[in-house]
Image (cartoon, rainbow, N blue to C red):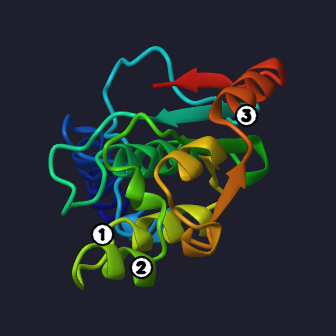
Amino acid sequence: MKSAAFGIVIIVTLAIFSAPGIVHSQPSPQSLPVAGYEAARDLSGAHELPDPNMDYKVVFSVGQDSKNPAEVHPMLPTIALYVNTLAKYGVPASHRHIVVMFHQRSADFDIIMSNDAYKVRYEGKDNPNVALIHALKQAGVDFRLCGQGLIGRKIDAKDVNPDIQIDLWAMTTMVNLQMKGYARVG
């Protein structure tokens, strides 16, 4: 009798956790590399998934404007989602080589500024991007900005967010990274 009851408990447990819509061992957003951001949701039957054995070399080109400069630039949460998805599927940090390149083309290029410099330029308003840029940097994402854009926008290098590296020119960085095998997104 006890073994029959135990068998029923096992069957019911397996049925519950095999039911559609039940998420299996999903890491919480806080246990992912970029805390507070989700990973892509599981999709039953999806064919192409992140491969833990692949070395991901990706450069995100951020040159478009955000719809609301008072909010976090929309590309940054997308990058957090991507980093967290790679981690969720077992891609180790050593296989995640993610670079974000900021361009002068963007009207909201000022998101590269430190919070203090941003506040001076925008009458005491905080730079809404600083916290997420820092969280992504802590998760291993490399941030770069176009030095020519800095000159063109008359931003002093001392006013740049310390989490962002200044490169000579976005064109040079993008070409160099692509020649090193980075895939360009954006």
| Side of 105 relative to 65 (left or right) | right
| Side of 156 relative to 70 (left or right) | right
| Residue density around tag 1, few if under 14, some if 14–19, many if 20 or more, within 10 Å | some
- Say which residue label 1 marks: 128
Q: Quadrant of residue 139?
A: bottom right
Is residue 25 shown to the viewer in this render? no
Q: Secondary structure at mark 2?
A: helix
Amino acid at dot 3: Thr
Residue at horizontal 30 percent and vertical 69 percent from the top: 128
Q: Quadrant of residue 30?
A: bottom left
Of badges 2 and 1, nearer the viewer stands 2
Residue 165 is situated, as x and y percent measured from the top left of the image, at 69, 58
- Say which residue label 3 marks: 173
Residue at horizontal 74 percent and vertical 29 percent from the top: 172
Residue at horizontal 42 percent and vertical 84 percent from the top: 116
In front here: 104 or 186? 104
Seen from this angle, which residue lies furthest top? Answer: 47
| Residue density around tag 3, few if under 14, some if 14–19, many if 20 or more, within 10 Å | some
- Say which residue label 2 marks: 115
Instruction: Say which quadrant the N terminus sits in.
Output: bottom left
> What is the distance, in whole Å, between disc 3 and disc 2 at their CAs?
25 Å
The correct choice, above or below, for 137 with respect to 103 in the image is below
